Image: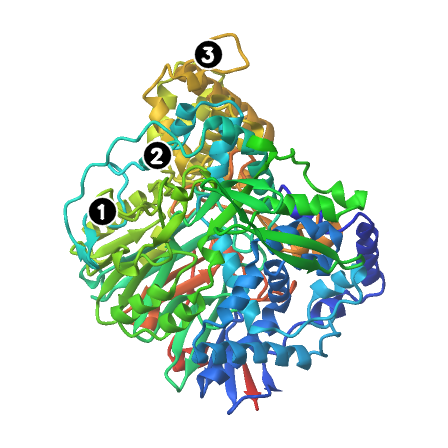
Amino acid sequence: MAVPSWSRRLWKTGLWTLSVLLVLALVVAGLSFWSVRRPFPTHSGELTLPGLSAPVTVYRDAYGIPQIYAETAEDLFRAQGFVHAQDRFWEMDFRRHVTAGRLSELFGDGQLSTDIFLRTMGWRRVAEAEWELLEPTTQRYLTAYADGVNAWIEATGGPAATSGKSLHYQVLGLQNPGYEIEPWHPVDTLAWLKAMAWDLRGNMEEEINRLALLHAGLSVAQIEELYPAYPYDHHIPILGEGTVVEGEFVPAPAVEPEPPVDDPGGQAGEFPIDPTVLREAAPALAAVQEAARQVPPLLGVNDAGLGSNSWVVSGTHTDTGAPLLVNDPHLGVSLPGIWYQVGLHCTCGYQVSGFGFSGVPGVVIGHNDRIAWGFTNLDPDVIDLFVERVDGDRYLVDGEWRELETLTETIRVAGGDDVTIEVRYTHRGPLITDADTALHEAVSDPAVTDTVTAQADTAPAAGGEEYAVSLAWTALTPGRTIEALFVLNTARDFTDFRRAAALFEVPAQNLIYADIDGNIGYQSPGKVPVRGAGDGRWPAPGWDSAYDWEDYLPFEQLPYVYNPAEGLIVTANQAVIGPQYQPLLTTDWGFGHRGNRIHDLLAEAIAAGPISVSDMERMLFDNYHPLAEVLVPALLAAPQTPLSKDEQTALDLLRTWDYQQPAGGKAGTPEAASSAAAAYFNAVWRNLLSLTFDELPADHAPGGGGRWFEVVTGLLAEPESPWWDRVDTPEQETRDDILSQALADAYREVAIDQGDDPTGWRWGRMHLLWLEDSSLGQSGIAPVEALFNRGPYEAAGGTQTVNATNWVASAGYEVDASPSMRMVVDLSDLDASRWIQSTGNSGHPYHPNYTDQVELWLEGRMLDWRWSRDAVEDAATATLVLTP
C-alpha cells in the first residue's frame, strides 16, 4: 500500500537503525512480552479516581466495550475520560498534536510542512476562541472529562513515565527520549472537531482539480463533461419532493432540473476569473493542494466518491411495529478504528450508548432511552478559495489596498531549533499559500527541504504583485458544535433533536431520527454560506467583494422532514433535495448510486413482508456493483478479436454474473463465480478509465468513484466521442475499440497475478484491506510498522456498493476507505439492537481487543448491543470500580 507523503517524512533515515535495534533487543533480551503487555490497562478490580463524588462502576464485555454507571454527569464524564485514556491515550495525544500543528514536537523537523500548514489555518486558535462561547454546563463537562484523562496520566507514573503508557511511546523514545506528556486540556477536545470538519470539508479538492485541468490544457467544456450535473431524473434525492417555506416543510411536487450551464460559473452563469489569470494562479493552488495532502487524515480521506449510508424505516414496515434505524459511516481505514464503543449511564438521567471518539466526551452516533440517530456527510459547499492579488502585506479589494492581519507562530522541533513563522489573514481567512513560502524560508537544513515537494513560484499578477490564495471555511469561525452532542445525547423528542441539530454547525451532516413512540425524521444542519456571486465551483477573485460570503442560511430554512408518508428515509450522500429548493447547498453532491440501491433493497424487503433487524444487517453487507448493470451489456456487445479459451471463459463470467462482489467462495459455488467475475470486471473498469481518460495529467487520473460512473455512463451513449480516442496512437479509436481493449488488458493483468483460469480468480485477492496505525504504522520503517499494523485481509464490496469498501482506480485495488462501523437500532427493544466497528476498542497493539472485531466485520456479522443493566451485567467479563 502506498505510504502517504506526510508519513514518509515521519522520521529520518537514522531511525531505521534504532528501530531495528529495538526489535532485536526485545527479542534477544526476552522482553517483548513485558514491553507489549506493560501498558495494558486494568479492567477489573478497584482503582482510585480523584474528584469523584461517588463510586463509578465500569462493566466490560468480551470485546472490551465499557458500560459506565455513575451518580452525576460530572462523575460520568470524568470516568469516561479515564477509560478513554486507558485504552486510547496515544491516539488522543497524537491527534491533539496534529490539530495544534505540533507534530514536530513529537517527530522532529520532518513534520514542519504539516505543522506550518495547520498553524496557518489556525485550528487551535479557533478552538481556544470557542471555549469562551460555551455554556457553563458544557465547560464543566469538558473539564470533568479532562480531569479524568489527567488522573490516568498521574496514575500511570506521571507525565515523564511515557513507556508504561503505550508501546508507541517506547518507540518514540528512541528518537525523542525527553518527551513528556502535557496535561489534557478541554480545548484539546474542541480542536478535534476541526479535524472532523477538515476530513469532511467538501469540495475544496474539486475547486483545485478543475483549475489544474484548465492549467493542463483542457477546455472549460471538457472539464464540465468530467463534472456532470446531479442526475435528479434517475437518482433519488433524500427529500425527493417538497421544499422548505418559511421554516415549514411543504410536500410540493418536484420539478425538472434546468439543463446545466456550459460554463465554469455553473448556476451563477459567469466565469469568476479570466481563464488566463486562473492558469497563471494554478501553481499557487497546486501548492495549497500539496500542503493539504500533508495533513494526516484523522477520519479518513476526503473524496466526493466516498460517504456513508443511513436509513430509517417506520413501524408500518417492520416486524415489531416500531422503527428501525441504520447507519454505517464510510471513513478511511486505520488502526485502531476511528470509533470507540461505549455506554454512559447516570442516575441523573444521562443515559446514552453508541459510538464516540477518544478525546471527546459523550456519544456521537447511537441512541438514548427514547431516541436514536445517525449521521452521513451532507457535504454542502462550505469552503471557498479566493485568488488574491498581494503586494507585501497588502491585498487588493475593489480597487483599494487593505492591510493583511498578521500574527507570529513559534513551532518547537524535537532535536532542533524552534521555527518562527508569520501567518497573514484577509477578511475572509488565512493566506494558505503562505504555508508553502514559510516552509522554504524557515528551513535551512537540506535534509528537510529535500522532503518537501517542489512547488513552482507564484505567478506575477498585474503591476508586479503576486497571486496568493486565501481560504474561507465555516470551521474557522468559532462555534458551539460540541454542545450539540450533549443536547443530542439527552434529546427526548424530534423538537429536542432539531434543537441539537441547530447547534451542529461543522461538519454539516445528514441527521436521521427515530423514537420509541414510532416517529421518524430527517434534518440538515450546519453553517451553509450564502454567496454574493458565484457558486463555489471555481476559485473566486479575491479582488472583487461581490464574491464574498454575505451570510449563512438560517437553520429554519434547511431541509427537514418528519414522518414522511412513505415511511422511510434514505441518506447516502446523494442530493438532499431537488432543484425546487432554491438556496444553493452545493453542486458537488455524491451521485446517488448507493441511495438508489438502498431504496431498491427496501422496496424488495417491504414487498416480501415486515422488515426485521436481520434484514437490515443483510442490506448493510450488500455487495452489488451499481455500474455493472450498465457497463456489462456494453462490454458484451463490443466486437471481439478471436479469443482464447480462457479469455472466453472470463467473458462468460460476466454473462452470468449477478453483480455481487464477495471476497471469495468455495470452488464451484455461485459465490466463487461472483467473486471471479467481480475480479475481472473491476480490472476492466480500471483499465477502461486509464485508456479513456489518457488526456488527464497523471496526478489527476480518474479515481473511479460515483462521478466517474456518471461520466462513463454518458459516454457509452456517444460511441464517437473524442474522449474515446487515444492521444498516443495515430488511429481514431471509438467506444467499442476501447471497451474491447479494456477487456483484453484486464484479462492479462489478472491472469499474471492469479493464473490463466478465470474460474479460480478471487476479488478478495486483489481487494486487500491493510490496517495501519495512523501514526507510527505509516512511518515507512518495516520493523516499526510490523509492531502496529495488521493485514492484509481479503475484503468484499467495492466502490459505491452499499458495503462501500472504496478503492482508487489510479492507485490500485486496495481498500482506502470502508464502513467504519455498522449499527441497527431496534426502537421496540433496545437490547435487540446490533453494532460493530471495523477493528476493536483498544489502541494497544497485541491487546485482545485490538482487532477482535475485524473478522466479524469482514463477514458482515454484528454484535449484540446491550442496553439494559441486566443485559450489561450478564455479558460482563470484567468489572472495574472507580472510587473517590
In the displayed structure image, the side of residue 344 where residue 452 appears, left or right: right
Q: Where is residue 444 in the image (x, y as percent from the top left)?
A: 79, 46
Between circles 3 and 2, the one closer to the viewer is 2
Q: Which of 221 and 606 is in front in this view?
A: 221
Which residue type carries mark 2? Gly
Label placed on residue 375? none
For residue 842, which quarter of the picture? bottom right
Q: Which of 627 and 556 is in front in this view?
A: 556
Q: Which of 490 and 458 is in front in this view?
A: 458
Element marked by disc 1: loop
Between circles 3 and 1, the one closer to the viewer is 1
Q: In which quarter of the image is the N terminus?
A: top right
Element marked by disc 2: helix
Mark 3 and mark 1: Cα distance apart in space:
48 Å
Which residue type carries mark 1? Gly
- The residue wearing badge 2 is 266
Which residue type carries mark 3? Pro
In the displayed structure image, the side of residue 277 where residue 48 appears, left or right: right
Mark 2 Cα shell of 10 Å, populated few (<14), some (14-19), many (≥20):
some
Q: Where is residue 147 in the image (x, y as percent from the top left)?
A: 58, 80
Mark 3 Cα shell of 10 Å, populated few (<14), some (14-19), many (≥20):
few
Q: Is residue 597 above or below residue 20?
A: above
Q: Position of residue 520 (x, y in %)?
A: 24, 63
| Sequence-first tag of 2 and 1 | 1
Mark 3 and mark 2: Cα distance apart in space:
46 Å
- The residue wearing badge 3 is 642
Between circles 2 and 1, the one closer to the viewer is 2
Q: Where is residue 183 in the image (x, y as percent from the top left)?
A: 65, 75
Q: Is residue 820 above or below residue 50?
A: above
- The residue wearing badge 1 is 240
Mark 2 and mark 1: Cα distance apart in space:
22 Å
Tell whether label 1 touches label 2 (CB within 8 Å): no
